């Protein structure tokens, strides 16, 4: 039996790190990548590699070093929060460069070999924020909505050639995501009361329970890779499943009214 190879982006912490370890445990030869090699030096995987998905040259160098793979996991990304009217566009461009264009660079580098071979899988880690946009998450959601759209088109294009596309939509997961976020919420100004209400709404949504760890997402990715006929989109976490199922079951106005009621949002 031939060992399958996988390359995973954003492995320094959280979902990327957990996914690299889980795929390794399931027999994959994993190439774990991050911008800083020292952040992944302790990972027990087949190979670690410096990779900046924002850079054309870095992505090209990664493909030249690794060659064709069976699985590409696009996980690298960061959050950006704040009112739409005031978040600096420079920060918005940075977010799109990593969250959307970074994944696109990796796809354009690694997908052709999958298509030519007639097999492979591309996993794009989006978010429940790629399904529903909440206040202060407009730009982060925009990057993830864009990746969702790209994934849908990619699924239609590459499925014909035997390449599986999976969209993983985590809800609240206990990672270091918040520490790496561009956070403009403190400059909410006239939106200050909404920021307070929204913080309470998030607590209501979680039911006071602690967020699950990244292993939940890593296992979902690995399970989906091993399942034939898996649906394109996979919400991960109780909150993600609740939000996505509610959104899919109604028009936007009905969904908004339901969420306002559940979250006690009066703004």
Image: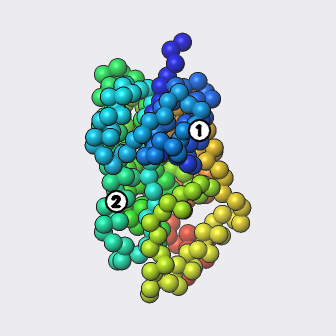
Relative vertical location of residue 253 with respect to residue 148 in this rendering, above or below: below
**Considering the numbered disc 1 on the image, is that residue within a helix, a strand or a loop?**
loop
**Residue 27: image x %, image y %?**
58, 24
Q: Residue 94 shows which numbered tag?
A: 2
Neighbourhood count class around disc 1 (C-alpha, 10 Å): few under 14, some 14–19, many 20 upward: few
> In this figure, what is the number of numbered marks?
2
Q: Which residue is mark 1?
A: 42
The answer to whether residue 45 is left or right of residue 36 is right
**Which of the 4 quarters of the picture holds residue 158?**
top left
Q: Nearer the viewer, residue 75 or 245?
A: 75
**Residue 16: image x %, image y %?**
52, 43
**Which of the 4 quarters of the picture holds residue 221?**
top right
Which dot, 1 or 2, sits closer to the camera? 1
Q: Which residue shows up at 44% across the image and 80% down it? A: 187
Mark toward the start of the polypeptide (1 vs 2): 1
Q: Which residue shows up at 49% across the image and 78% down it? A: 186
Q: Which residue shows up at 28% across the image and 43% down it? A: 56
Mark 1 vs mark 2, CA separation in Å? 28 Å
Q: Residue furthest front?
A: 38
Q: Which residue shows up at 38% across the image and 65% down it? A: 139
**Considering the numbered disc 2 on the image, is that residue within a helix, a strand or a loop?**
helix
Could you tell me if residue 252 is visible in this image? no
Neighbourhood count class around disc 2 (C-alpha, 10 Å): few under 14, some 14–19, many 20 upward: some
**Which of the 4 quarters of the picture holds residue 155?**
top left
**Residue 196: image x %, image y %?**
57, 80
Q: Residue furthest top?
A: 1
* Quadrant, the N terminus: top right
Could you tell me if residue 58 is visible in this image? yes
């Amino acid at each position: 039996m031939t060992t399958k190879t996988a390359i995973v982006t954003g492995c320094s912490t959280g979902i990327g790190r957990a996914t690299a370890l889980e795929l390794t445990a399931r027999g994959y030869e994993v190439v774990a990548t991050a911008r800083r090699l020292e952040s992944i030096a302790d990972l027990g995987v087949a190979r670690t590699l410096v990779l900046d998905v924002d850079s054309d040259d870095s992505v090209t160098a990664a493909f030249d070093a690794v060659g064709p793979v069976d699985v590409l996991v696009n996980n690298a990304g960061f959050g950006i929060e704040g009112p739409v009217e005031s978040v600096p566009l420079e920060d918005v461009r940075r977010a799109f460069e990593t969250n959307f264009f970074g994944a696109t660079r990796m796809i354009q580098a690694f997908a052709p070999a999958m298509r030519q071979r007639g097999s492979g899988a591309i996993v794009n880690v989006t978010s429940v924020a790629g399904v529903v946009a909440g206040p202060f998450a407009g730009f982060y959601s925009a990057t993830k909505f864009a990746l969702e759209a790209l994934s849908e088109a990619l699924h239609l294009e590459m499925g014909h050639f035997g390449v599986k596309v999976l969209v993983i939509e985590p809800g609240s997961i206990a990672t270091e995501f918040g520490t790496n976020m561009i956070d403009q919420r403190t400059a909410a100004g006239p939106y200050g009361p909404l920021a307070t209400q929204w913080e309470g709404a998030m607590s209501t949504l979680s039911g006071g329970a602690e967020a699950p760890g990244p292993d939940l997402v890593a296992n979902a990715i690995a399970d989906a890779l091993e399942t034939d006929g898996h649906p394109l989109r996979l919400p991960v976490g109780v909150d993600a499943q609740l939000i996505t199922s509610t959104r899919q079951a109604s028009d936007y106005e009905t969904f908004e009214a339901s969420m306002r009621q559940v979250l006690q949002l009066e703004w």
